[in-house]
Every structure is written in structure tokens, then in C-alpha cells.
Amino acid sequence: MASLGPLLDPIMTDLGIPLSRGGIISAGFFVGGVISIVVLNCTMARVPAKRILVFGMLLQGLGLLLAGLVSWDLWSVTLACVLGGFGGNFVNTTCWMWLPAHVKEHLAAAALLMITFFAAGMIAIPLILGIVIDQGASWRWILTVEGGISAVAGLVYAGLPFLDIPGRQNVRLPHLKQIFARNRGLLVGMLVAIFAYTGAETVLNVWLPKFHIHVFEAGDTWASFSLTLFWIGLIAGRLMVMPLSRRFAPSRLLLVCASVLTVMAVAVAFAPNLAASLVLTVGAGLGASASYGLIGSYAGRFPGWESGVVSSSFILVGSLGCATVPYLFGPLADAAGFRAAMALVAVPAVIYGLISLLIHARAGE
């Protein structure tokens, strides 16, 4: 996922993909993730969580290897990304199902801690990729190396211990009705909020480097560094919010995050020069920072096996946001310009900020 932004411009240039269709590549990755969530929750309840993690890492590696070694046009690289996203989201979803099953106190803080480790990779990888691309490395070589690393990691993880997730069930329609009836307002609020948040964040993850190349004529290193700065803001914000999550309701912190992201998205879009835009990108990261973990922590409000299903539904809808909103960004940037398209990231931020008020009411905080 961290490679999507830095590699988007080289892939589009090499394969001759027009701006209006650039979002299809990232959409493919996240559509694969949506499919994996459905398969995992409807057919794999009896498969141990550890096997699912290993299977996901190996599939993700295969998808990356195919993208780097075999793809020849937009649709071949997109299909390879579908496979990579399919495998990768087995890992992501399993981790989010595991967390509420085993962490019973300060779940919001634990969720933020887990995301912080993810963020560390998102800080380092774009900067590294920008440098190696400027040094002449091809996107094919980069994806091939990443695919090999993912496959090796899966084989190594097969020998490590991992607690299973108790009480998992293959989800059927009556299960969904039961969960919906328990607290429909909270569930709907979580799902709308995560769709809006992941849509906004993924636009920045995927399109920030391309935005800086197109608007400010930045080189690959500086363009990729913008994504590193965004994630520095993210991780700094999460570290600040973790202790606050023990003192304040997560929904109130979510409203603050959404408000900051709204302002900073518009500021990045209309920054007068590259230096200002890079600085403001850190502010956008601070705004986005804790939102994912704060929304996801409300899965712990549902008892037993229901929390795992809610976590999976949360990731499923979040993946739909990741696939949909960044895809729409390409045609919008082509028609209205990059600055206007980037400023509209504020719209989903406003939406999930308003939804935080519903979550606050329905969670009884």
C-alpha cells in the first residue's frame, strides 16, 4: 500500500495511462481487499487465524511479483493489484479481528498503537522509493523486490506463535440482522465515518506525490517525501492522541481530527509553492492521524463474536472508500485541475466529522 503513491507516476508514464484513468490501479488493489473480507468472514471461520495471515502474505507477494514481472498495460497491472490487495487484506482484517477479541481495556489506545507500527512503514517506504526512483530504479524492480519480501515474511511467520481468535463464525444474514438490531445507529455511524475517512486518507496516500509532480514540477524524491511528511504528521498525531483517548471520548477526538484535516486539505491544495505545501502536508497528517483507530475502537462496544464481524464490516466499508474516492479523483483532477480536486478532500472530512456527533450519541458517551 505504501508504494501506490510513489509508483503511480512511473507506472502511468511507462504504460501510457492517462490521468483520468490513473485511479483504476489503486481501485483494483482495494477491490481485491473488499473481496477478501467477504471470503474471510463468510467461508473461513474454521481456518486458524495464523494460517490466514500466512496465506495472505503469500498471496500479496504473488500479486506484487506478477505486477512487477508480467504486467504490460493498465488492466494487467490492475489485475495483479487486485490479487495483491486480496492477500494483503487477509492480514489487515485478521489483525483488526484479533484486537477486540484479546484487548479488553483501553482498546482505542491499543488500536492507535497497532496503527502506529503500520505508520512507521508508511513514513520510511515512500522516502526510500523516491530516492531509488531518482537513482534510476524501475517500478517493476521495486514491485518484484516487495513481492519477494512479502512471500519470505509469510514463510517466516509460519514458524511463529499466534493466539487464535475465539468464537469466529461464518457470517450469515441472521448474524448481520442481530448485530444491526443491537445498536444500528452506532454501526451505521461507524461505517459511514470509515468510508469517508478512508476515502480522504487514500486520496492523499495515492495522489500526493503525483499532485506535487504535476503542480510544482517536483522531482521523484521530493514528491515521495511529501507522503513521508504526511505520515510523520499521522504518527505524531497518533502518539499525541493515545494518552488523550484515556481521558476523552473517542468521538470527541474524532471531531477534532476531522476539523483539522478539513482545513489542512484545502491549505495543501492552494499552497503557493512546494515548500509551503510540504509543510502543510504534515498538518494534514496530524488531522487524519487517529481517525481510523478511533472509529475502529467502537467495535469493542459489541459483545463476543459480534465485535469481530463489526471489525470486518468496518474494514470492508473502509476498503470501499479506499477504492471509490481515489478512483474519482483522477477524472476530477483531469476536468477541474489538481488543486480543485485536492481541495475537495475536505468534503469527506466534513462528513465524518459530522458523523462523529451521531457516534457520540449512540455510544452513550
Image (cartoon, grey):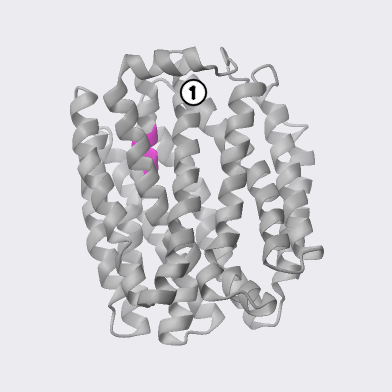
Q: Residue at x 39, y 39 (%)?
A: 293
- Measured from the top left, where is residue 361 in percent x and y? 18, 28
Residues rendered magenta in the picture: 292-296
Q: Is residue 201 magenta?
A: no
Q: Is residue 97 visible?
A: yes
Residue in view at x 51 percent, y 54 percent: 120
Could you tell whether 45 is left or right of 96 in the image? right
Q: Residues within 10 Å of mark 1 (few under 14, many from 20)?
A: many
Q: Which residue is mark 1?
A: 309
Q: Can residue 161 be seen here? A: no
Amino acid found under the numbered disc labelled 1: Val
Residue 166: image quadrant is top right
Question: Which element carries disc 1, helix, strand or loop?
Answer: helix
Spot occupied by residue 315 in the image (x, y as percentages of width and height): 48, 37
Q: Is residue 234 above or below residue 89?
A: below
Q: In the picture shown, does residue 281 fall above or below 60?
A: below
Dividing the image into 4 quarters, which one contains the N terminus? bottom right
The dominant secondary structure in magenta is helix
Would residue 107 be found to the left or right of residue 45 on screen?
Answer: left
Q: Quadrant of residue 167?
A: top right
Total numbered labels: 1
Q: Closer to the camera, 280 or 241?
A: 280
x and y percent of residue 161 in the render?
Answer: 69, 26
Q: Residue at x 70, y 21 (%)?
A: 47
Considering only vertical position in the picture, is 114 above or below 20? Answer: above
Residue 296: image location, x then y, percent: 39, 34
Work out whether residue 59 or residue 320 is closer to the camera in this orientation and state it. 320
Of residues 3 and 352, which is closer to you in this image? 352
Q: Residue 365 appears in which quarter of the rendering?
A: top left
Query: Residue placed at 41% from the left, 85% from the top?
Result: 216
